[in-house]
């Protein structure tokens, strides 16, 4: 059965759903009195090949935190040989900060992978975020060309 967000069939319990802003902490909700309805998940995170084919996916129940993203990536790329050269994600700068602060950057990612943001994020991101503009640039070659000219 296809169902729109907030739409209930006559036999489903009436629930009040509050619109959740993207990547904000989810308020605690009361457990339903019965357990006959499906649970809600915050998002489905996917890893896609450059051609668009889905390689792996997982569900995040309450938020899309950087720690959860790193755990997901570590579970899908357990060995150095399996890790991609680039991982493009809209919040790569925050994932990179988290990886540096929790030590997984030096242990796991530094030798093999660059975290880059998508071009939309890069253009619209604050210009004072040095880490994002220096290390998560989706076109790092452009920086080199500007230096050489």
Image (cartoon, rainbow, N blue to C red):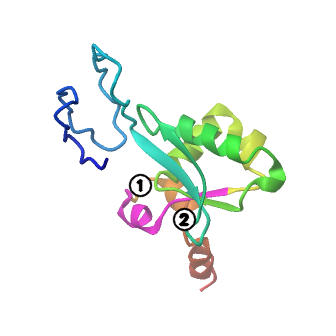
Which residue corresponds to the image point at 46% horizontal and 46% vertical from the top-left?
44
Select label 1 or label 2 by which is in front: 2
The span picked out in magenta is 114-126
| Residue 119 is a magenta residue | yes
Q: Residue furthest top?
A: 33
Quarter occupied by residue 32: top left
Nearest the viewer among 118 and 76 is 76
Nearest the viewer among 72 and 35 is 35
**Percent x, y of residue 81:** 83, 55
Q: CA distance from mark 1 to mark 2?
A: 14 Å
Instruction: State left or right for residue 55 relative to residue 125.
Output: right
Q: Which residue is mark 1?
A: 128
Q: Quick one: quadrant of the C terminus?
A: bottom right
Mark 2, secondary structure of its residue = loop
Which residue corresponds to the image point at 16% horizontal and 34% vertical from the top-left?
10
Nearest the viewer among 40 and 12 is 12
| Residue 21 is a magenta residue | no
Which residue corresponds to the image point at 40% horizontal and 59% vertical from the top-left?
127
Q: Residue furthest bottom?
A: 149
Mark 1, secondary structure of its residue = loop
Q: Earlier in the sequence, mark 1 or mark 2?
A: 1
Which residue corresponds to the image point at 44% horizontal and 63% vertical from the top-left?
122
**Percent x, y of residue 117:** 51, 60
**Percent x, y of residue 46:** 53, 52
* Above or below, comparing residue 130 to residue 137 in the picture: above
Point out which mark residue 115 bears: none
Neighbor class of circle 2 (other Cα within 10 Å; few <14, some 14-19, many 20+) is many
Quarter occupied by residue 113: bottom right
Q: Which residue is mark 2?
A: 137
Instruction: State left or right for residue 124 relative to residue 96.
Output: left
* Above or below, comparing residue 107 to residue 83 in the picture: above
Neighbor class of circle 1 (other Cα within 10 Å; few <14, some 14-19, many 20+) is few
């Amino acid at each position: 059965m296809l169902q729109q967000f907030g739409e209930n069939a006559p036999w489903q319990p009436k629930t009040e759903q509050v619109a959740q802003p993207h990547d904000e902490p989810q308020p605690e909700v009361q457990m339903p009195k019965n357990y006959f309805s499906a649970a809600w998940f915050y998002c489905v995170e996917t890893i896609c090949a450059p051609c668009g084919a889905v390689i792996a996916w997982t569900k995040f129940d309450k938020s899309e935190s950087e720690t959860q993203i790193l755990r997901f990536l570590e579970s899908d790329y357990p060995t150095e040989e399996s890790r991609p050269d680039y991982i493009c994600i809209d919040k790569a700068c925050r994932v990179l900060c988290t990886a540096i602060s929790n030590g997984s950057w030096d242990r796991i990612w530094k030798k093999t992978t660059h975290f880059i943001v998508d071009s939309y994020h890069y253009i619209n991101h604050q210009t004072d975020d040095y880490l994002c503009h220096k290390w998560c640039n989706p076109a790092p070659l452009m920086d080199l060309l500007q230096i050489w000219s």
